[in-house]
Image (cartoon, grey):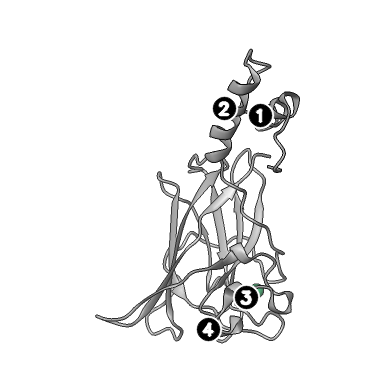
Amino acid sequence: MANTKPDRREMLEMCISRGLLVGGAAMTQTQLLAFWQKTEAGMHQPTKAEVLGPFFRKGAPDNKVLRAPGDAGFPLKVTGRVIDTRGRILEDAKVDLWHADHEGLYDTRGYRYRTKLSPDAKGLYGVETVMPGHYADRPAQHIHYLISAPGHKTLITQVYFATDPFFEGDPVKNWNKRGIASNKELILPVKLFEGPGAPRAEVNFDIVLEKA
Ligand SMILES: [Fe+2]
């Protein structure tokens, strides 16, 4: 919201446009402002979009483990949930996710490092994979997403990794380096774990869809 206080009509229009009121309930401006502020505080901003890119393939199987035994590449677990702008779980969502292998190569004939996930009853999705590699056209490690849910706008986006050498150790300063990432919110913090066992990384990416 802007710094200036919206007038009653503007608040009503904003509330109605978001499906927060049915018709024009009889409320004073003070009540309406309090209602709006309370509602606004609980709202989630829709996840930012990115371009699809040339390597999407329809028909990926629902596979929660993309990393095969012996695969090269740094083990990576990706988790998150799919919700709407009011924080409600979208358990009927579908999460297409695809990325390059550790050398920056996409499987353009099969479904290596590709999946189409169905979140569980808590709206959670998760996949075991490897950290994507770099490739010349897009030299920042990234994962592509296409997320859909009934009654909501389909979202195409990508996520990046704060640990990527591309960001030179300072993703806050360098998030827009060479214009690769379109939004700093899409650069994810990375949790790194050491033994027992092999080191691994984990990222969390919550997805917020807006109504169609
Ligand atoms: Fe890509």
Q: For the residue carrying disc 1, how many other residues have a C-alpha within 10 Å: few (<14), some (14-19), or many (20+)? A: many
Q: Which residue is mark 4?
A: 102
135 or 179: which is nearer to us?
Answer: 179
Q: Does label 4 or label 2 sit earlier along the sequence? A: 2
The numbered disc on residue 35 is: 2
Q: Does label 1 or label 4 sit earlier along the sequence? A: 1
65 or 9: which is nearer to us?
Answer: 9
Q: Which residue is mark 1?
A: 15
Relative to 63, residue 212 above or below: above
Amino acid under disc 4? His
Q: Does label 4 or label 3 sit earlier along the sequence? A: 4
Amino acid under disc 3? Lys
Quarter of the image where the C terminus is located: top right
Query: For residue 67, what is the image quadrant?
Result: bottom left
Q: Do labels 2 and 1 touch, CB within 8 Å?
A: yes
Q: Does label 2 or label 3 sit earlier along the sequence? A: 2
The numbered disc on residue 173 is: 3
7 or 212: which is nearer to us?
Answer: 7
Q: Do labels 2 and 3 touch, CB within 8 Å?
A: no
Relative to 42, residue 70 above or below: below
